[in-house]
Amino acid sequence: MTALPQTMFATILSHDGYSGEATGPNIENAGDWLAEAELTVPEPGPGQVLVKLRSASVNPSDIHFIKGEYGQARVKGAPAGFEGCGDVVATGQCAEGLMGQRVAFITAGSGAWAEYVLAPAMMCIPLRPEISDEDGAAQIVNPLTAMAMVDIAKGAGDAFVVSAATSQLGKLMCGLGRDLGLKPIALVRRGETVGMLKDHGAAEVLVTTDPDVAQNFAEVSQSLKPRVFLDAVADQLSEQVFCAMPNQARWICYGKLSAELPKLTQMGQLIFMGKQIEGFWLTNWVTSTPPQDQARIVAEVQARFADGRWKTDVSERLALRDLVPNLAEALKKSDGKVIITP
Ligand SMILES: NC(=O)c1ccc[n+]([C@@H]2O[C@H](COP(=O)([O-])OP(=O)(O)OC[C@H]3O[C@@H](n4cnc5c(N)ncnc54)[C@H](OP(=O)(O)O)[C@@H]3O)[C@@H](O)[C@H]2O)c1
């Protein structure tokens, strides 16, 4: 085995704690939130592994996090980035079984936008050889969320609504919904993506920038009766969509892509129609779902990527050393993930 270097290149957080704001996963200049650094290569503690990075993804959660508006506090000077794929090159106690394996991982403390990454062994998934490094870099957060949320929709009728449906997660959910015999109703911002969403499995696609979208949705809702709204936008149109859904409908907010704060306009719907507003966070799902169910779902996710039913669309590839100057521009491209390589 080659000896590990003493130091590594990393992209680190420039701020501590929370910002107290919620301006959305957009940045003008990554240098406002991130810096470049040469750090000591971390040592894995008990239950942890050290991963040599192959590729990392940039998710909206990463951008919320670097800006201080995510569900955990920032630590200034720690590498950023939650998710990636790489080779286990050192292990702590009780994690020895992962040594040498290529894994998809979620980080803990020392993030994915660095040459070496610390991850809990529990959050590492050994990858099947057919799965590419790029699919491996986006193998956990979105696919597990898609499986968990479509499972919720499956128990509540034949149709469900997905906002920001051109997102990677939206496309995964439309495809999965179709495969399960459900009718995904996709909401998109850009008219030119309607055909693409239908190819991905959407039964209906509505364009949110269309002035008639509320009326169009009301008609679709009347006919397909969706009772679950999987919403990553959470703006005023989301509230209108929820209000146009039938009784017992659930508005499940799992993202905040829009900075707009919606107002509730029809409280009687909660009282008289049994409607509910709730949240979904994968972190809570992981801690509340039995390990054997998670293992079954992880195997299904890998099978879907291995046989091509799911794939990660990539909009831009950035080398780690080019990340800070180029990330903001790269994020402006739609229809795919920014993938980072060491
Ligand atoms: N709660 C959880 O556990 C959990 C887990 C995973 C992901 N998520 C959330 O799921 C969402 C999607 O994640 P992803 O990784 O799939 O995203 P992604 O692939 O990076 O795509 C995001 C897409 O959303 C659209 N969008 C951006 N701002 C919007 C706005 N204000 N209104 C409507 N659409 C907007 C854009 O598409 P167009 O330019 O085509 O409109 C953009 O390409 C994010 O909000 C993320 O935080 C939550």
Image (cartoon, helix red, strand yellow):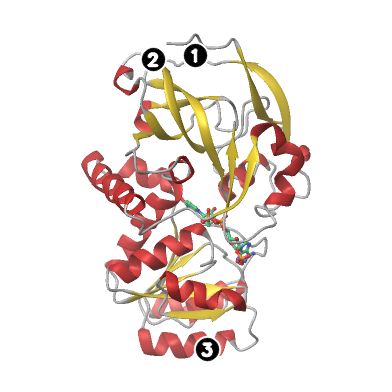
Relative placement, left or right, of 195 versus 181 is: right
Q: Residue at x 38, y 43 (%)?
A: 131
Residue 62 against residue 79 in the figure, above or below: below
The amino acid type of the residue labelled 1 equals Glu
Q: Which residue is mark 2?
A: 92
Label 1 sits on a secondary structure element that is loop
Q: Is residue 109 above or below residue 6?
A: below
**Residue 19 position within the rendered picture, expressed as x and y whole percent measured from the top left:** 70, 42
Q: Quadrant of the N terminus?
A: top left
> Which residue is pictured at 68% across the width and 27% down the height?
76
Closer to us: 188 or 76: 188
Residue placed under numbered mark 3 in the picture: 216
Q: Nearer the viewer, residue 286 or 19?
A: 286
Which numbered disc, 1 or 3, marks the residue that appears first in the sequence?
1
In this view, 292 is above or below 220: above
The image shows residue 157 at horizontal and vertical percentages of 29, 75
